[in-house]
Image (cartoon, helix red, strand yellow):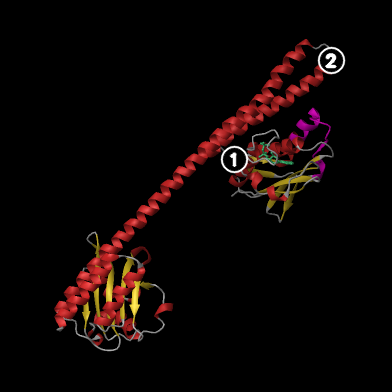
């Protein structure tokens, strides 16, 4: 077989392999054929990653004369081949029978070529949708080789097929990614829908319970003459009023947090006064048999520039939770300065406590340790969001059966 017929035959074998499959095994086989036939040492296909300013080797085949290539970084930075990249990007081939004939402006590229021991090379740009997006290279290390016009033309056919293969793979990848994204969006929408239904069902239940109590006991109060009995019913109504108000304000806050519209109003406020106010509210109403303590005289005056009403809301929420889950012992509100940097406020109770496996997830929305307990499961996530927005942190220490301490921090200096 003469040389031309030989070239035609190997090119047609490579073409039929590439048309058969774009699996890596088949592509490697095709590259091996080219490597052997043209007695090359390195045949490779890259795509350009302009964002990373480097070329990424997708496929490559080397002869035994190239050692250590497998450990080499698959990314070739543009900085190491500036002349070559410029030429390729303008759509030109690089044909060098003898590396010594590199033009002077290719000195940086020449250093890399010499380091790799290259003698000759042929590099053809790969175009995707009319733009150069990669290149295919045919390098010799053992010998200098002359690239004939016919060989270059035939190898262009192979390079064009690679352009098509890579473009198709990219499209498939994009389609797969698009499908994955839309499946994820659908799943999220379904989850949101389920969550919304669960939320509405649970809210309706949570609202109806105190409302029924308020309606029922209000009419009983009107018919009751005995003063002690009336007072008792009045306390029940008051307690349920609080609960209902809390639920409704949680729902409002929650929807504002979700839409990023929860308003914050910054002002100077005295932490000691707020704690004292809360103390007064709970001790004067004596919500249950459990005593509540805030020792005003033991705490320093601290003036913070933050949203005082939101801080009051967080502390009140923690105190109400403490009441909900404590039947004996006490509830204590306190704070202390840490590292001259921030204040740590805590509400401790001697209630039922929280198992360690729930210490993180109770700060997630709708989570309740006991699904039958009263409440929306929104209180703690709202508190945490508020505290974090005001540049603090929130956490808890708790032991089942022993009690809980919910704490949060606030910076002493405004941020
Ligand atoms: P809710 O607004 O329904 O009270 P939270 O987010 O405030 O919801 O609380 C979520 C859950 O965390 C409660 O249902 C309860 O299981 C647990 N929890 C909160 N505070 C305490 C506490 N002081 N003692 C024991 N469990 C608590």
Disc 2: residue Cβ within 8 A of ligand 1's nearest atom: no
Q: Is residue 388 left or right of residue 145?
A: right
From the image, tell me which residue sits under label 2.
227
Q: In this view, does 399 lie to the left or right of 384?
A: right
Q: Determine whether 283 is above or below 134 in the image.
A: above
- Residue nearer the viewer, 41 or 131: 41
Q: Is residue 112 magenta?
A: no
Label 2: how many Cα within 10 Å (few below 14, some 14–19, many 20+): few
Q: Determine whether 167 is above or below 143 in the image.
A: above
Image position, residue 293 (x, y; %): 81, 39
Instruction: Calculate the distance from the C-alpha at mark 1 to the C-alpha at mark 2.
Output: 45 Å
Q: Residue furthest bottom?
A: 143
Q: Which secondary structure lies at badge 1?
A: loop
- Residue at 67 percent across and 34 percent down: it is 375
Image position, residue 96 (x, y; %): 22, 82
Which contiguous range is marked in magenta? 278-298
From the image, tell me which residue sits under label 1.
266
């Amino acid at each position: 077989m003469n040389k031309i017929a030989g070239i035609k035959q190997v090119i047609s074998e490579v073409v039929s392999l590439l048309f058969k499959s774009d699996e890596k095994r088949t592509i490697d086989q095709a590259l091996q054929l080219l490597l052997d036939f043209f007695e090359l040492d390195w045949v490779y296909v890259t795509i350009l990653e302009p964002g990373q300013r480097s070329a990424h080797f997708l496929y490559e085949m080397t002869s035994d004369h190239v050692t250590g290539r497998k450990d080499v970084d698959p990314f070739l930075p543009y900085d190491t081949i500036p002349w070559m990249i410029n030429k390729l990007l303008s759509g030109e081939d690089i044909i060098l029978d003898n590396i010594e004939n590199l033009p002077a402006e290719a000195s940086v590229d020449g250093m890399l070529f010499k380091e790799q021991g290259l003698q000759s090379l042929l590099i053809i740009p790969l175009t995707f949708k009319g733009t150069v997006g990669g290149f295919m290279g045919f390098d010799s290390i053992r010998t200098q080789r002359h690239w004939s016009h016919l060989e270059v033309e035939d190898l262009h056919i192979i390079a064009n097929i690679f352009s098509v293969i890579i473009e198709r793979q990219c499209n498939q990848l994009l389609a797969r990614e698009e499908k994955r994204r839309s499946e994820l969006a659908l799943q999220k929408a379904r989850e949101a829908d389920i969550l919304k239904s669960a939320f509405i069902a649970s809210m309706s239940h949570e609202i109806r319970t105190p409302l029924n109590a308020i309606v029922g006991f209000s009419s009983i109060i009107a018919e009751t003459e005995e003063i002690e009995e009336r007072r008792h019913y009045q306390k029940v109504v008051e307690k349920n009023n609080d609960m209902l108000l809390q639920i409704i304000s949680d729902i409002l806050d929650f929807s504002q947090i979700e839409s990023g519209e929860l308003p914050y109003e910054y002002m100077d406020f005295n932490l000691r006064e707020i704690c004292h106010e809360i103390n007064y509210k709970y001790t004067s109403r004596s919500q249950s048999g459990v005593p509540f303590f805030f020792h005003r005289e033991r705490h320093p005056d601290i003036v913070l520039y933050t949203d005082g009403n939101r801080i009051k809301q967080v502390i009140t929420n923690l105190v109400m939770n403490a009441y909900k889950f404590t039947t004996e012992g006490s509830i204590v509100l306190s704070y202390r300065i840490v590292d001259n940097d921030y204040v740590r406020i805590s509400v401790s109770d001697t209630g039922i406590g929280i198992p360690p496996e729930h210490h993180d997830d109770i700060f997630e929305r709708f989570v309740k340790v006991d699904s039958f307990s009263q409440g929306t499961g929104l209180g703690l996530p709202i508190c945490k969001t508020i505290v974090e927005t005001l540049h603090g942190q929130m956490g808890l220490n708790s032991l089942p059966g022993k009690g809980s301490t919910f704490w949060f921090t606030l910076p002493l200096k405004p941020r």
